[in-house]
Amino acid sequence: MLFNQATRQGLQSDRHLRQQLAVSRDLSMIMNLNERYTCETRSCGLNDGAGLPGQGDYAPDYFDAEDSLAKGTRFTAFEALCAQGLLTELKRAIDDQALEGAPEGAAVNRTVHLLDATEGGLSLPPHRYRVDWKDADERLLRQVQLIPTVAAWCP
């Protein structure tokens, strides 16, 4: 009986470690998306360049001389995204990514929640989001709150 109990505990421990590894890999992918998410035009999306965006690549330049629009129009559009809708495309990009590496028979589910000021913070919406990972029994494995790099350019 002790041997069977020790075996079960060992298998549960192994499954838990594999779940945590899958969550860590998924979080790494999300952090990468978080850094590559930019709003250089009138909408936001993932920067598909070879490296991470530079300081001037996250938001449109207010005084872009090559912009065919009136000075500041693209930045005004960015300010409107900051007021609402900044994270819509980032959430969609995260949701489109499959969570891989969970051990067989021990599913891990990811949920992304856009947060607002009423959900425990001083941050104005929609600059923060929370990611929850749960097992098949809906037990919380890990939870993180993130702010995309592009939000630093919001007024």
Image (cartoon, rainbow, N blue to C red):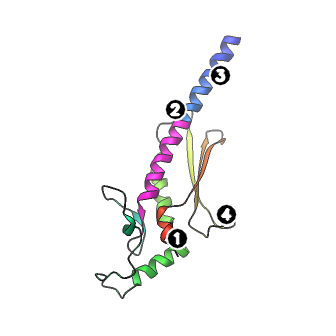
At label 2, which amino acid type do we have? Pro
Q: Which residue is mark 1?
A: 85
Whole-Å distance between the Cαs marked 2 and 1? 35 Å
At label 3, which amino acid type do we have? Gln
Whole-Å distance between the Cαs marked 4 and 2? 35 Å
Q: Residues within 10 Å of mark 4 (few under 14, many from 20)?
A: few
Q: Which residue is mark 4?
A: 121
* Residue at image point 37% right, 67% down: 57
Mark earlier in primary sequence (2, 1):
1
Single out the mark in the foreground, 4 or 2: 4
At label 1, which amino acid type do we have? Gly
Q: Is residue 32 left or right of residue 85?
A: left
At label 4, which amino acid type do we have? Gly
Q: Are marks 3 and 4 in contact (CB under 8 Å)?
A: no
Q: Which residue is mark 3?
A: 9
Mark earlier in primary sequence (3, 4):
3
* Residue at image point 45% right, 79% down: 77
Q: Residue 20 location in percent, x, y?
A: 56, 37
